[in-house]
Amino acid sequence: MKQEMSYNIHNILKFQIVTNKRGGLMRDLNLPFSFFEVKEVDDPDIILNIGKFTPSNKNCYLIDHKYHIKDNYFYCKDAGGRAKWEIEIFGFEEGNTIINFNETVLGLERILFPDLLPQDIALKPMIEYKLGRKDYFSIHSAGISKNNQAYVLVGRGSAFKTTITMDFVRNAGYNFLGDERVIIYGDRVLNFPIHLFLYSYRSKYLPTENFRNILDKVRFVMYLRNNSDYENSDVPVVDSSKLRAMFFIVRTNKPKVRKRPVTLERAVDKLVANEKGEMFRNPSMNLSDFGYHYLKYMLTYSYIFPKSKIATFWDDLEHKLKEILDKIPIYEVEIQERYTSKSFQEIIKTICSD
Amino acid sequence: MIEKYYNIHDIVKFKIVDRTNFFGKGNFYKEYENFETMEKIDNLDFTIYFGKFTPANHNCYITEDKFFIKENYFYCKRDSYKFGNWEFEISRFEDSGNMIVHYSSKFIGYLVSQFIIDFMVHFNLNEKGYSIVHGSCVSKEGRAFLFTARGGAGKTTIILNLMERGFNLLGDDLTILHKGEAIGFLSPLNIFSYNISPLIIEKIGFRKKLVLSLKELLYKMTRGYIKLFTQINARDIFKDNIINSSQLHSIFLLTPKESIRIEQMDKEDLIDNLLVNQKLDTPFFYSYILEYSYIFPENKLSKHWERYIENLTTNLPDDIPIYKVEVPRNYDSRVFEKILQFISK
């Protein structure tokens, strides 16, 4: 039986996931965008079909023996880590998009979150691409807000973005916009919670974002089994706020940490490096190694169509970010390698004194 | 301990100090064997040490919990691909010359160590204003013809065919470009069942032929997961038909589609193509550069790709013909005839 799920991100982007599989044992992990789930959507921007399909890859360029490319179309068979998949994208560059994805995953993940891989590998980057094309920039960062003032905390992995937002929310009365991504549009920051109940569990039961032991994990599974109502999560999610300031959080093993202002030019370079760098990170549940798949698909498409919107995507992003970040203060904030209770006191002092 | 010196046309010079006894690194030595020199070199661009090392990763910024970054310094605590894993450290890359690289791996990770040496060579060429491009190059009567492509477009097939017609070889996989000149980069021919030509079959021994068949069997059995090329030194086969440099005459960008079709393209598009090609060939360093440029967006390493574009703009002449060639997936004699037509133009 086909199961169809519909999503609406702030009325900017609508998409559907159609799958044959059962929901998985851990819905929040299996369906990272559930926060945006709605009953139905008309005219979705993206449809992700999970399951077997027959590709329409006639008349294509064939690159590296495996990437089939024609105008606005991409198809390949690929593999990484414990997963193998076949992916076809109509509307790769523009227009409405259909993604067909068929995968084989070995291991427990297949039972726990059977639909996660296609969302990690293809849907997530496609959402970011489409949002960007509409001038809504999905930024790899955390976001918190108070009194309609939003602070965006940009950081590469392991910069304690999640932990810091947890502390802001539970210890300082801030609202939550996102711990992995937020959307910046003009001078507004829109929420973009991903795996919201994972975040909710962490902030309820853990001192930092890291699971301490197996018991934490077991408790987490129980927690997910009992919680699925996204409207009534304990996290104080706010819809959007005015962009007040941006901070680049960077971990260091230097003895002394500091805060300093960043020029617009440097900030935008860092943001773009952060977005591209993020495309190299493993899909969230380590289903696949060296997770550079979608960026590779984009590059290969640009190889054939060097003037396409995919090829110019990053340069366009750079230009547009320069325009919208022109008026806000931007800082680099160094934090100690180890996160302690003192760390948060320092961070909140630094951030609130901008 | 093994110490070897390499000199690439007096442009980039480096040394390898191998303190391991892992037997599988042979491939690396093969890759650059045509540039190995017996003389000791003093003004080295970089030195690579293989084997255990203690990283100097204090006072660093840390990203992804595994990259340690400070001015002029990059250390990767661990990374892995398929069955290999490694750690490495590069320092002094913001200076000119004398960069130091340490690379350590458990067992099989040395098999993939190639990527780090390749990047060091490419980075140094780039810094000195030379462009390395993914393409094979042949020459006749002082005119060089470059065939650039991604994998599977038949670069090797075309040049092997042209060599049967009296062309000389500059490079099979990579070519250096500098101010209108093509400079040879003689890496081993990567032979797999689909690109072996009669010329090669004739010249390789029984053992190599057997190895080739075994590798193809392995490829089929693992459904493409393990693909091992057989490396054959072009110098062993072509001896007198190898030259070091030649004036660039025309460029062909090959892309496999249905049938042969040739049209002219402009230099700017070609540069975009060559850049993407190079990035796709350098996945690990593409990622490491991004980590470094997140911390130091203005530094030399972060500007690697921008510099690559600048160099290509200078090194590719404005007035030579550049062709985009759609080629069929299986070559027949018509393909060669058509390309020859354009070569003799």
Image: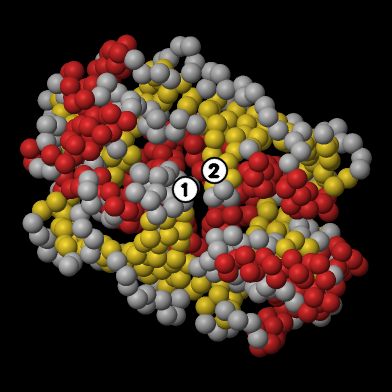
| Point 31% across, 41% down: residue | A139
Q: Secondary structure at mark 2?
A: strand
The quadrant in which residue A246 appears is top left
Say how the picture is coloured: secondary structure
Q: Is residue A200 above or below residue A253?
A: below
Picture layout, residue B36 above or below residue A14: above
Circle 1 is placed at which residue position? A289
Instruction: Please provide percent x and percent y for residue A296.
Output: 47, 56
Q: In the image, A34: left or right of B125?
A: left
Label 1: chain? A
B217 up-or-down from A247: above or below:
below
The image shows residue A327 at horizontal and vertical percentages of 28, 32
Q: Is residue A237 above or below residue B142?
A: above
Q: Is residue A198 left or right of residue B33?
A: left
Which residue lies at the image location 65% right of the left edge and 35% below the top edge? B104
Residue A52 horizontal/vertical position (percent): 32, 70
Rendered location of residue B263, percent (x, y): 57, 78
Q: Amino acid at mark 1?
A: Asp
Point 80% across, 41% down: residue:
B13
Query: Residue at image x 23%, y 64%?
Result: A20
Quarter-wise, where is residue A96 in the image? bottom left
Along the horizontal axis of the image, is A135 left or right of B38? left
Residue placed under numbered mark 2 in the picture: B80
Distance, label 2 to label 1, CA atoms, is: 8 Å
